[in-house]
């Protein structure tokens, strides 16, 4: 069975069509038309993902996740990790991507940040946990990261697809010709994803989209949606005192807050009486600032 | 004149029938609301995979019909194709276990095989690119099941 799974993974790896040349050209300058396509309402997107596409995405995401864990250590706290997984999985069950598994981990780092890799891999730092005051705020950050996965922000930016029905099937055949070549190009695209997560950041529009989708995911799951602006506001205030811990890969907090305020007012989300689950959060999260 | 009217009615009927769009629930469960608002009453809870008929769209909500029920759903919960089965590169070793965080002796071997790289390749990858697949395996072993998450939500924020 292990051999079969290993073969599946290798086939999946071979099937990943990476439009490297196109990516190199378009990564910094994703066209306006594409941006507007990607910001269209969820339902309007034509679903073309096949099981092979999803396997390619998971394989890609696993390699990114391993690289994240190579940079920042995993926190060894079984009880807290299970709690974060339960909160995260509860949110993920209410998302529109229930065909993948979700994994949540805590990174032992004082930097205030969270990351997600395609295919369902989500990370939050102890520095971020220390800034939170209730479970709804934890859920808010996880919902934002889940949204990056459900909206396929990295997958779309780097054009990760299996090679069936792809306009770049020719490149897929070239990649299939050499395992070493395939691996080399695969590694380069993982490098690009790591660069997005740690240096360059997502496109501004993708961050705003993740906030919007995350807000709705919170309300749908049953958490206080005001938790996201509440957390961001506190972050904005606290990080003025400790700028070294600020995330360099998220857009300015004020821009995000302005967007969130507009959505909250339009949808009257501030009138929802949904729980913060403060006591439960304080039972599990004992880190203090 | 009567004939023209009949043709017009028939054409209208077909146009309406063709305009009806079938959508599918992708979230595990989806609350059908009486109004396009999270504050409105829940008409019914729909399950993943159920087919619904689109009646009307607004910015974030869709009005749908399901059997004899009409109500509003968040657009984020549906797509225009049925949901795929759970897709994973790993085995389903933990998917049905209530205590999914427990360890197994063979897990490291199993996940290594699913990494997309052979064991010896993985070591080289780890060395050259500072990838930590052992920590990744640990992360994957900590996955919780759907059942556990649903039970956690039912606790209604209690411990």
Image (tube, grey):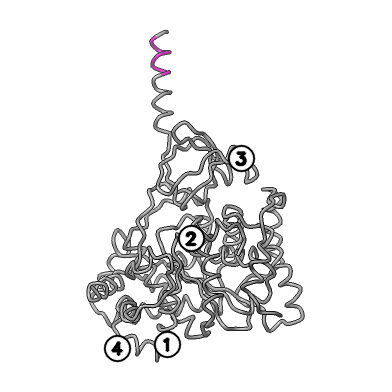
- In this picture, is B71 found above or below B83? above
| Chain letter for the residue marked with disc 1 in the picture | B
Q: Main secondary structure of the magenta part?
A: helix
Q: Which residues make up the magenta segment? A: B3-9
Residue B91 position within the rendered picture, expressed as x and y whole percent measured from the top left: 32, 69
Badges 1 and 3, same chain? yes
Badges 2 and 4, same chain? no
| Chain letter for the residue marked with disc 3 in the picture | B
- In this picture, is B8 found above or below A182? above
Q: Nearer the viewer, residue B14 or A129?
A: A129
Extreme top residue here? B1
Q: Name the residue under label 2.
A: A150
Q: Quadrant of the C terminus of chain A?
A: bottom right
The residue shown at (68%, 66%) is: A279
Calculate the distance from the C-alpha at mark 2 to the C-alpha at mark 3.
Answer: 27 Å
Extreme front residue here? B159
Q: Name the residue under label 3.
A: B41
**Element type at marker 3?**
loop
Dot placed on the residue nearer the N-terminal end, 4 or 1: 4
From the image, state whether disc 1 or disc 3 is nearer to you: 3
Q: Name the residue under label 4.
A: B120
Residue A93 position within the rendered picture, expressed as x and y whole percent measured from the top left: 48, 57
Dot placed on the residue nearer the N-terminal end, 4 or 3: 3
Q: Name the residue under label 1.
A: B129
Asked if marks 4 and 1 touch (Cβ < 8 Å), the reply is no
Badges 4 and 1, same chain? yes
Mark 2, residues whose alpha carbon is within 10 Å: few (<14), some, or many (≥20)? many
Badges 4 and 3, same chain? yes
């Amino acid at each position: 069975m292990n051999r079969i799974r290993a073969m599946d993974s290798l086939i999946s790896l071979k099937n990943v069509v990476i439009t490297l040349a196109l990516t190199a050209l378009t990564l910094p300058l994703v066209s306006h038309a594409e941006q507007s396509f990607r910001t269209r309402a969820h339902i309007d997107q034509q679903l073309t993902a096949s099981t092979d596409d999803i396997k390619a995405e998971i394989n890609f995401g696993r390699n990114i996740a391993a690289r994240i864990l190579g940079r920042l250590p995993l926190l060894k706290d079984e009880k807290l990790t299970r709690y974060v997984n339960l909160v995260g999985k509860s949110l993920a069950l209410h998302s529109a991507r229930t065909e993948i598994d979700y994994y949540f981990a805590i990174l032992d780092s004082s930097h205030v940040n969270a990351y997600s890799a395609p295919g369902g891999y989500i990370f939050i730092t102890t520095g971020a946990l220390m800034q939170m005051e209730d479970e709804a705020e934890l859920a808010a950050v996880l919902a934002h990261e889940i949204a990056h996965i459900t909206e396929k922000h990295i997958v779309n930016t780097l054009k990760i697809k299996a090679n069936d029905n792809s306009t770049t099937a020719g490149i897929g055949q070239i990649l299939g010709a050499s395992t070493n070549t395939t691996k080399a190009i695969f590694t380069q695209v993982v490098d690009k994803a790591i660069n997005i997560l740690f240096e360059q950041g997502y496109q501004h529009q993708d961050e705003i989209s993740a906030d919007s989708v995350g807000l709705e995911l919170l309300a749908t799951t049953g958490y206080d949606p005001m938790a996201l602006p509440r957390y961001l506001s506190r972050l904005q205030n606290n990080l003025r005192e400790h700028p070294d811990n600020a995330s360099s890969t998220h857009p300015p907090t004020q821009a995000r807050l302005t967007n969130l305020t507009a959505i909250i007012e339009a949808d009257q989300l501030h009138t929802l009486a949904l729980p913060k689950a403060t006591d439960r959060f304080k039972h599990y999260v004992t880190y203090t600032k | 004149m009567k004939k023209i009217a009949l043709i017009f009615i028939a054409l209208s009927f077909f146009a309406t029938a063709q305009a009806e769009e079938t959508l599918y629930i992708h979230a595990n469960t989806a609350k059908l609301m009486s109004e396009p608002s999270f504050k409105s009453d829940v008409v019914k809870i729909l399950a993943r995979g159920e087919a619904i008929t689109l009646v009307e769209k607004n910015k974030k909500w869709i009005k749908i019909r399901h059997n004899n029920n009409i109500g509003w759903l968040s657009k984020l919960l549906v797509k225009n194709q049925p949901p795929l089965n759970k897709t994973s590169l790993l085995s389903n070793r933990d998917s049905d276990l209530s205590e999914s965080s427990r360890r197994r002796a063979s897990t490291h071997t199993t996940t290594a095989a699913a990494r997309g790289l052979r064991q010896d390749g993985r070591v080289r990858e780890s060395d050259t690119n500072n990838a930590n697949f052992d920590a990744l395996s640990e992360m994957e072993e900590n996955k919780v099941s759907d059942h556990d998450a649903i039970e956690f939500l039912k606790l209604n924020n209690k411990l």
